[in-house]
Image: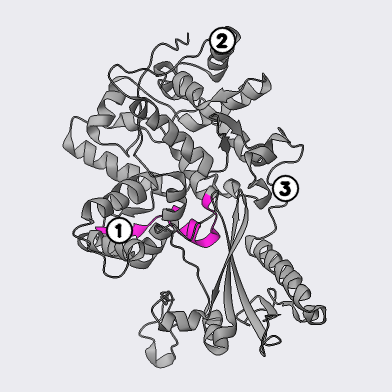
């Protein structure tokens, strides 16, 4: 029997603000992809040095910043995001989750995978935090439970707030122990709302920042995953443009956490050490459902837009066969066509898409189309697109980004110099943002951007072969 008065505080690793986390993900991925594999004794210094350079400039004082950098490395990139792991050979490797993000540039999908694998209790928290959870027999995958409750509430035309989800679900001991169902929770909420009863988390002697911070941060990840919206008045809405993913989450409600924390005797040091090693390996791997987490660009909408269609008839993943790169190229092509046409309609035919032509080193050929004697000069554009919930802000000093370019693209950048441009396209909830980087080769020469060779080609002949198998 669900008793909402049984309250218990389960916390997760403290993160940053939503926009900071969206920004930091790219920075962490850049550093980890650059330095890993990395020997255990070198990992801390290399990570801290690289991240300090990205966030604070070339002359950053890593000693003065050590506490902050350590938190980025261990708490957020490591425990919370699961972006690397320590193998038995005492070497740190980039996780599957990091490699997938680098490959697909889908930040909401990254956070979907995190939310799908989060559970209470878990190996993120220190043993002094974990032990009481085990003593209370807590066992819950919290986000499938939250999604299922939101779906049931929507069916009953009940709007849940951040406070409702905090009090009745995420701070409820009966829920955390797996002893209550979403149906019971929603029934209690409906009864209270019918009587205009508003229940809040109250801890004697503690401010609201203590009582609600862990709730807001957990919901923050669901919002970064593009699964919910939190309105200005703190109502929580489902993003039914992500219906396929929402259904998948809801289907996991009531299923025990995938990682069994109860098989370890945490009173023994060797068991504790093994628990954390096993958790890191488990959590850093992408889930079996990772391919279902792809974010359709049409699902990146504002809360006002999603209100217009509570439950779309078509599944949210319809049309996701269109590659992100193709979407980005089409957007830039349309933009360039309109820009050049407005300058001189005669030049519009010189805007040509070449994305399907291999080996050129650019996706779109356009023209400068600006006043001056170079107005009809050819402009070469390489398009790099990504998806994230928040749009990046150039005034934010914590923002950094990275793109991968091929050898042909770098050769084209060297060859065409001032006329070669990278268009970085961000598909976000509030619209599309495009950052244009011109003269990329010269910027590399001037130290403004960093270009790192990521692959070596090995050419060999018969005189290099030492043995033959078979």
Asked whether, in this view, residue 347 is left or right of residue 102, the answer is right
Q: Nearer the viewer, mark 3 or mark 1?
A: 3
Query: Which of the 4 quarters of the picture holds residue 195?
Result: top right
The image position of residue 70, as x and y in percent, is: 25, 52
Residue neighbourhood size for the residue with mark 1, other residues' Cα within 10 Å, grouped as few (<14), some (14–19), many (≥20): many
- Residue on which the image places disc 1: 92
Of labels 2 and 3, the one closer to you: 2
Residue at 32 percent across and 63 percent down: it is 56
Relative to 17, 308 lies left or right: right
Q: Secondary structure at mark 3?
A: loop
Residue at 35 percent of width and 20 percent of height: 8
Farthest residue, direction front: 371
Q: Secondary structure at mark 1?
A: strand
Q: Which residues are magenta?
A: 89-107
Residue drawn at (52%, 28%), measured in percent from left and top?
146
Residue 228's tag is: none
Which mark identifies residue 318? Answer: 3
The picture places residue 229, in percent across and down from the top left corner, at 57, 36
Local SS, label 2? loop
Pair 1/2: label in front = 2
């Amino acid at each position: 029997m669900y008793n909402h008065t049984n309250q218990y505080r389960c916390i997760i690793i403290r993160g940053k603000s939503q926009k900071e986390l969206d920004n930091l993900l790219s920075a962490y991925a850049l550093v980890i992809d650059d330095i890993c594999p990395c020997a255990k004794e070198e990992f801390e210094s290399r990570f801290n040095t690289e991240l300090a350079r990205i966030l604070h400039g070339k002359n950053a004082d890593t000693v003065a910043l050590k506490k902050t950098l350590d938190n980025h490395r261990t708490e957020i990139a490591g425990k919370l995001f699961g972006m690397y792991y320590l193998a038995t050979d005492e070497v740190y490797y980039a996780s599957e989750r990091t490699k997938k993000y680098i490959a697909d540039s889908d930040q909401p999908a990254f956070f979907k995978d995190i939310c799908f694998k989060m559970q209470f209790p878990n190996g993120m928290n220190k043993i002094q935090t974990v032990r009481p959870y085990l003593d209370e027999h807590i066992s819950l995958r919290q986000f499938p439970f939250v999604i299922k409750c939101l779906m049931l509430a929507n069916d009953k035309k009940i709007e849940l707030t951040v406070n409702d989800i905090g009090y009745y679900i995420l701070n409820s001991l009966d829920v955390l122990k797996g002893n209550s169902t979403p149906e019971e929770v929603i029934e209690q909420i409906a009864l209270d709302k019918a009587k205009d009863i508003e229940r809040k988390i109250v801890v004697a002697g503690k401010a609201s920042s203590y009582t609600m911070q862990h709730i807001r941060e957990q919901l923050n990840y669901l919002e970064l995953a593009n699964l919910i919206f939190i309105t200005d008045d703190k109502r929580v809405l489902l993003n039914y443009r992500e219906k396929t993913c929402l259904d998948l989450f809801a289907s996991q409600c009531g299923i025990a956490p995938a990682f069994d924390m109860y098989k370890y005797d945490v009173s023994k040091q060797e068991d504790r050490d093994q628990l954390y090693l096993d958790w890191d390996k488990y959590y850093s791997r992408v889930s079996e459902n990772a391919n279902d987490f792809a974010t359709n660009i049409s699902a990146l909408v504002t809360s006002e837009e999603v209100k217009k269609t509570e439950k779309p008839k078509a599944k949210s993943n319809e049309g996701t066969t269109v590659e992100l790169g193709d979407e980005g190229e089409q957007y830039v092509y349309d933009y360039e066509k309109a820009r050049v046409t407005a300058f001189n309609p005669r030049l519009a035919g010189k805007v040509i898409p070449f994305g399907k032509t291999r080996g050129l080193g650019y996706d779109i050929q356009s023209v400068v189309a600006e006043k001056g004697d170079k107005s009809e000069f050819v402009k070469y554009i390489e398009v790099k697109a990504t998806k994230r919930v928040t749009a990046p802000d150039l005034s934010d000093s914590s923002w950094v980004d990275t793109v991968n370019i091929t050898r042909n693209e770098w050769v084209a950048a060297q060859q065409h110099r001032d006329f070669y441009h990278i268009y970085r396209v961000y598909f976000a909830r509030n619209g599309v943002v495009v950052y244009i980087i011109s003269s990329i080769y010269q910027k590399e020469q001037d130290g403004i951007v960093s270009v790192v060779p990521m692959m070596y080609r090995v050419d060999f002949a018969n005189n290099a072969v030492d043995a033959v198998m078979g």
